Amino acid sequence: MVLKSVIDGVKGLKPPFSVIVVTRSESFNETLASLVKSVGRGVIVMVSFNRPSSSLESVFKGKARGSVFYVDLVTQVASGEPQKKENTVFLASQRNLTDLSITLSEVLNRLEGEKFVILDSLTTMLLYNDVSTTTQFLQFLANRLRLWNTSSFILTMEGKSEEEVIRVISQVVDKTIKV
């Protein structure tokens, strides 16, 4: 059901597109797995404010048809120095959005083929950054990803704090999908 909602939601959008995906908390994991399945054979850059990349790898196993690269904003904060991994960049803070932007630029420049960024999640971003900073960053990021010829999904849960950000950034994304 969730996978069909996501696929129907992006039907007709020409890459590079930018989409906000709003889900209920009880279907968050299913929605994230459905996003990965919906991408097809492209390269996914998974930006995780929410869970360590090692946890996401097990969730995505067998679901991603293309390759997955992780930008992990959790592991280093939680455990200190993470192991080096070929398909993962570990960042030291969920608050340093400038570092995230620079890292995304570097990662996307070295990857080839059709690229997709999945940002997990706006809800968790708002725990570490205020509404104004988060809104400005997501507006910048949506436009920058489009210029980098990269489609994107911004995943979020339904909630009061998210409503204001969604209202503002919905002006720069192609669509908001509620699943």
Image (cartoon, grey):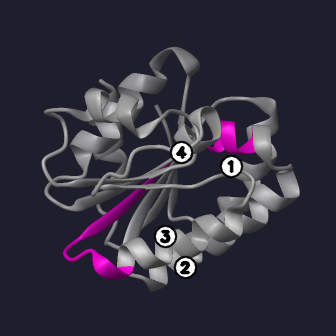
Q: Please say if 47 is above or below 27.
A: below
Q: Does the magenta stretch include residue 116?
A: yes
In the image, what residue occupies the spot 42% across and 82% down?
A: 148
Q: Does the magenta stretch include residue 88?
A: no
Earlier-in-chain disc, 1 versus 2: 1
Which label lies toward us, 2 or 4?
4
Q: In this view, does 93 lie to the left or right of 61?
A: right
Earlier-in-chain disc, 2 versus 3: 3
Q: How far apart are marks 2 and 3 (CA)?
A: 10 Å
Which label lies toward us, 1 or 4?
4
Classify residue 11 by image quadrant: bottom left
The residue at which mark 1 appears reads as: 94
The residue at which mark 4 appears reads as: 81
Classify residue 134 by image quadrant: bottom right
The residue at which mark 2 appears reads as: 144
Residue type at the position of mark 4: Glu
Classify residue 33 by image quadrant: top left
Residue type at the position of mark 1: Gln
* x and y, in percent, of residue 93 in the image: 68, 51
Asked if labels 4 and 2 touch by Cβ distance under 8 angstroms, the answer is no
- Secondary structure, mark 4, is loop
Asked whether the viewer can see residue 35, the reply is yes
The residue at which mark 3 appears reads as: 104
Query: What span is colored magenta in the figure?
Result: 109-126
Asked if labels 4 and 1 touch by Cβ distance under 8 angstroms, the answer is no
Asked if labels 2 and 1 touch by Cβ distance under 8 angstroms, the answer is no
Dot 2, how many residues are within 10 Å of its Cα: few (below 14), some (14-19), or many (20+)?
some
